[in-house]
Image: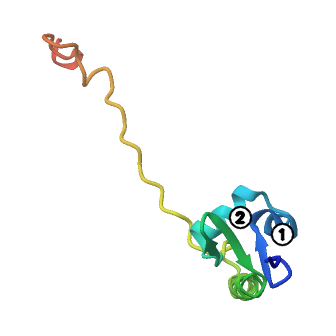
Amino acid sequence: MCDLTSIGYLTIREVSEQLHLSRSTVYELIAREGLPVVHFGRAVRVSKVSLEQWLARREAAQARIDSHGSLWHTAPLPIRQKSKARPSLRQVAPRGQASVSSRR
């Protein structure tokens, strides 16, 4: 049986160690920023060549952004959904009772 590391594939842990990032950050890079992976059943591996190419593209994008001086992040930030505001006490009354704002 051959070792996938010797033929150019890294585990998530190995990628995290090489980039000095946590494993969860590496998984976020995969999910949100397109770090390419290969699945072997349940196992997830990153090609050394693909990782190097992805890093080069990321560095080039960072250099373009830095030259403009306005943005610091290479990928668009996810849009946060606004949470539904809780109704105030004036808007909600217990069943069968009028709300506080209607009692004057």
Judging depth in this view, the residue of 94 and 88 nearest the camera is: 94
Badge 2: residue crowd in 10 Å (few <14, some 14–19, many ≥20): many
Name the amino acid, label 1. Answer: Leu
The residue positioned 87% from the left and 70% from the top of the image is: 18
The residue positioned 66% from the left and 68% from the top of the image is: 44
x and y percentages locating residue 8 in the rendered image: 80, 83
Read off the residue under disc 2: 26
Q: Which mark is residue 103?
A: none
Q: How many labels does the image show?
A: 2
Residue 27 left/right relative to 51:
left
Badge 1 element: helix
x and y percentages locating residue 31 in the rendered image: 58, 67
Q: Quadrant of the N terminus?
A: bottom right
Q: Compared to 94, does 49 lie above or below?
A: below
Badge 2 element: helix
The residue positioned 33% from the left and 26% from the top of the image is: 88
Sequence-first disc among 1 and 2 = 1
Judging depth in this view, the residue of 73 and 21 nearest the camera is: 21
x and y percentages locating residue 6 in the rendered image: 86, 81
Residue 5 left/right relative to 23:
right
Label 2 near label 1: C-beta < 8 Å?
A: yes
**Residue 75, picture quadrant:** bottom right
Read off the residue under disc 1: 19
Q: Quadrant of the C terminus?
A: top left
C-alpha gap between disc 1 and disc 2: 9 Å
Judging depth in this view, the residue of 65 and 31 nearest the camera is: 31
Colour option used = rainbow
**Residue 3, picture quadrant:** bottom right
Q: Compared to 96, does 32 lie above or below?
A: below
Name the amino acid, label 2. Answer: Val
Badge 1: residue crowd in 10 Å (few <14, some 14–19, many ≥20): few
